[in-house]
Amino acid sequence: MQPITHLKSKTVVLPATDVDTDQIIPARFLTTTTRQGLGANLFYDWRFDADGEEINTFALNKQAAKDCQILVAGRNFGCGSSREHAPWALLDYGLRAVISTEIADIFRSNSLKNGFLPIVVDENTHTWLLDHPGCELTIDVAQSVVILPDGGSVSFPIDSFARYCLLEGIDQLGFLLKHETAIKEFEETRSWTP
């Protein structure tokens, strides 16, 4: 995983509500256990027509969306079945964060474990972001704030362990491996056996 300390990017807006994980990455593309290549199929049924041609009116296919790393989504993003492939696809496509007023719990957990940042903001901020696609935001993970174009900031909730892992660019296993020496020492010196 790549560390996320600050993220500065223009936004791409997908205002649809109740976007589920099957819309993010359709089930027919879940034939892999690797993270690479899934971005090509991100929002496949919305991005491409029946002949596999890009649908020009879809937000991610517009020229203004190229190189955007922050997705502003409608309410209840990431609902539906639990699949780590959804944040993998978003990351592989080049997105690093999603902002909404509501993000499904399992999707949120899977995202944080894989280095993708789900951000929940208040209704007024969300409405403003939806109305201003392409605005440039700065996300400060250490401070848990989104800095708006006018210099104002909005805080977002994130638990301290998830924030630590994002800042360090590690997952839960990486966190444990950072303590491998201490774990080994404990195992060798403990006075009891399990």
Image: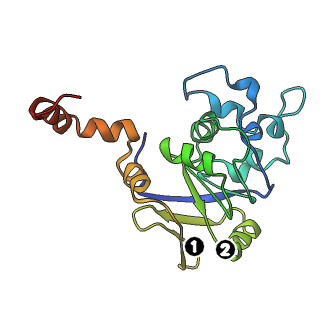
Is the C-beta separation of discs 1 and 2 under 8 Å?
Answer: yes
The residue singled out by tag 2 in the image is 125
The residue singled out by tag 1 in the image is 148
Depth check, mark 1 against mark 2: the one in front is 2
Residue beneath the point at 62% across and 41% down: 90
Binning the other alpha carbons within 10 Å of mark 2 as few (below 14), some (14 to 19) or many (20 upward) gives some
Mark 1: secondary structure: loop
Look at the image and tell me whether residue 92 can be seen.
yes
Towards the viewer: 63 or 57: 57
Where does residue 138 sit, x and y in percent of width and height?
A: 51, 65
Where does residue 82 sit, x and y in percent of width and height?
A: 65, 38
Q: Which mark is residue 129?
A: none
Task: Kindly identify the amino acid type of the residue bearing the numbered disc 2.
Answer: Thr
Direction from residue 169 to residue 72 in the image, left or right: right
Residue beneath the point at 62% across and 39% down: 93
Total marks shown come to 2
Q: Is residue 88 above or below residue 158?
A: above
Binning the other alpha carbons within 10 Å of mark 1 as few (below 14), some (14 to 19) or many (20 upward) gives some
Of the numbered discs 1 and 2, the one sitting upstream in the chain is 2
Direction from residue 58 to residue 85 in the image, left or right: left
Colour style of the rendered protein structure: rainbow
Distance of label 1 from label 2 (alpha carbons)? 9 Å
Residue beneath the point at 68% across and 25% down: 30
Direction from residue 46 to residue 180 in the image, left or right: left
